Image (cartoon, helix red, strand yellow):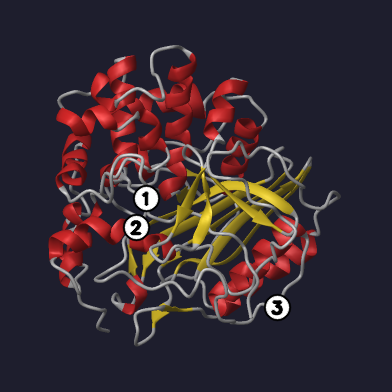
């Protein structure tokens, strides 16, 4: 298929594409949970309170059925974990390998994409607590050669973590064929190793998305630089530090930065469709994830994701002051001004009919993930897909919601709020149906959006 060609010069397009793709996200589903009962906080407000999901035990049978409906809707394979207090449910539906029909299993390891950002943010905030990092200090204090001059003096550590730095994403620099409407660079870079310095340079050399502190604009470059900051102040490889001080501290057993292009534990193949541009879908489960680094390289099980968020939200990983900073939010809006969520430091908040949830979404080549937890960590849901960008685009370049989106929304509504909604395609109500960027959408730039009424 032919995707829209850039309507602006490549340099301008390069600078704004990350912001545009905030509308291209897993959580824009067709069947949704109304949020009319929830009240959103003002920008910068601490968002730690709110009603929670209905108390009680999980409906295991209903969750099994909702997940099976995702497979019937066309998703190759999916796995999920849901918790309500001590009551836990794990499920899987579909196949892990299209050639052999090997089934997916609940405990399969999965590439998390941008869920990695919360782990990196926790590590930075631990150093804030230790007095080695000041959130409101300019990044030039720590990395003067990386971000020199006035720019480095105006961009703060906080701006990196809440995506208000104005630094552009590096994705199009790392995968240049995307600007030409081709996915060739996905294949040529399969075993290429990117140094963090190279990724940071690509983002910093691109046209800024705004002035420092002006607005929220999602960019993986921010979290690659955060990893470099960690290395500077700890004198330790940032991935090793995160493993030791965050992953192990949370008690996670199946979460790690991969040492090679392969996932070491039981896993599914991970199929990329790229909105019909790759047909049939191609397996990218073997991939050098240095291009994600401290912004998106982690592997984990869905159960481990829930365990991490419960440890985080109940204060096991951060001191109270730092957790409050992590949950201090800015408004995250798309290019048309629609409010997508309230974004903190590596995590985002959405409001639903059953209250506030904290979490993030992630997407890498062939894999997508979404996680939500109530503020007290009691009600939790994590969901992984083994097929990415499965939707089609209409003649105007907007994503057409389909059966998979509807089934995803129905599962999320049941898992989060014990609400039953129809698993059938509907048009998007808020924000407007997301439009693909001028050119090709990019992965990892998958922030949350509220579960909102479909019509």
Distance Cα–Cα, label 2 vs label 3: 31 Å
Query: Circle 3 sits on which residue?
Result: 422
Query: Does residue 117 appear to the left or right of 5 in the view shown?
Result: right
Q: Earlier in the sequence, mark 3 or mark 1?
A: 1
Please identify, in this view, whether the residue under mark 2 or under mark 3 is nearer the observer. Answer: 2
Residue most extreme to the right: 56
Considering the numbered disc 3 on the image, is that residue within a helix, a strand or a loop?
Answer: loop
Please identify, in this view, whether the residue under mark 3 or under mark 1 is nearer the observer. Answer: 1
Query: Circle 1 sits on which residue?
Result: 218
Residue that appears at 25% across and 53% down: 171
Considering the numbered disc 1 on the image, is that residue within a helix, a strand or a loop?
Answer: loop
Instruction: Mark 1: give few (<14), some (14-19) or many (20+) Cα within 10 Å.
Output: many
Residue that appears at 59% across and 20% down: 319
Instruction: Mark 2: give few (<14), some (14-19) or many (20+) Cα within 10 Å.
Output: many
Instruction: Mark 3: give few (<14), some (14-19) or many (20+) Cα within 10 Å.
Output: some
Mark 1–mark 2 CB contact (< 8 Å): yes
User: Can you give x and y, in whole percent of width and height, for residue 279 in the image?
Assistant: 31, 78
Q: Earlier in the sequence, mark 2 or mark 3?
A: 2
User: Can you give x and y, in whole percent of width and height, for residue 301 in the image?
Assistant: 54, 46
User: Can you give x and y, in whole percent of width and height, for residue 303 in the image?
Assistant: 61, 44
């Amino acid at each position: 298929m032919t995707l829209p060609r850039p309507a602006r010069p490549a340099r301008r397009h390069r600078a704004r594409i990350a912001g545009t793709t905030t509308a291209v996200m897993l959580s824009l589903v067709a069947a949704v949970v109304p949020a009319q009962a929830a009240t959103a906080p003002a920008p910068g407000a601490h968002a730690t309170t709110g009603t929670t999901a209905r108390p009680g035990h999980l409906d295991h049978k209903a969750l099994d059925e909702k997940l099976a409906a995702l497979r019937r809707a066309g998703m190759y394979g999916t796995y999920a974990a849901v918790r309500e207090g001590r009551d836990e449910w794990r499920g899987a539906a579909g196949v892990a390998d299209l050639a052999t029909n090997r089934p997916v299993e609940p405990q399969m390891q999965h590439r998390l994409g941008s869920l990695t950002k919360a782990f990196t943010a926790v590590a930075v905030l631990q150093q804030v607590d230790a007095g080695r990092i000041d959130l409101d200090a300019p990044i030039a204090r720590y990395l003067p050669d990386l971000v020199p001059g006035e720019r480095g003096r105006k961009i703060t550590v906080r701006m990196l973590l809440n995506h208000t730095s104005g630094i552009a994403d590096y994705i199009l620099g790392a995968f240049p064929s995307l600007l030409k409407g081709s996915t060739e660079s996905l294949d040529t870079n399969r075993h290429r190793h990117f140094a963090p310095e190279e990724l940071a340079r690509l983002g910093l050399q691109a046209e800024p998305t705004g002035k420092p502190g002006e607005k929220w604009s999602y960019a993986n470059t921010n979290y690659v630089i955060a990893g470099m900051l960690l290395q500077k102040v700890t004198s330790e490889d940032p991935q090793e530090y995160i493993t030791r001080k965050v992953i192990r501290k949370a008690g996670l057993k199946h979460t790690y930065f991969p040492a090679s292009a392969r996932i070491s534990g039981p896993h599914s193949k991970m199929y990329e469709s790229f909105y019909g541009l790759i047909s049939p879908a191609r397996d990218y489960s073997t991939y050098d994830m240095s291009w994600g680094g401290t912004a998106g390289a982690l592997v984990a099980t869905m159960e481990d994701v829930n365990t991490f968020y419960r440890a985080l939200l109940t204060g096991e990983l951060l001191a109270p002051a730092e957790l409050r900073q992590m949950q201090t939010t800015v408004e995250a809006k798309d290019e048309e001004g629609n409010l997508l969520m309230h974004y903190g430091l590596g995590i985002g908040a959405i409001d639903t009919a059953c209250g506030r949830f904290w979490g993030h979404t992630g997407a890498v080549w062939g894999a997508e993930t979404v996680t939500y937890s109530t503020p007290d960590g009691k009600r939790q849901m994590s969901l992984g897909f083994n097929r990415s960008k499965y939707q089609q685009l209409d003649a105007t370049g907007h994503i057409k919601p389909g059966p998979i989106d509807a089934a995803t929304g129905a599962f999320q509504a049941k898992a989060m709020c014990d609400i039953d909604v129809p698993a059938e395609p509907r048009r998007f109500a808020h924000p407007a149906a997301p439009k693909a960027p001028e050119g090709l959408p990019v992965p990892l730039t998958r922030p949350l959006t509220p579960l909102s009424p479909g019509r």
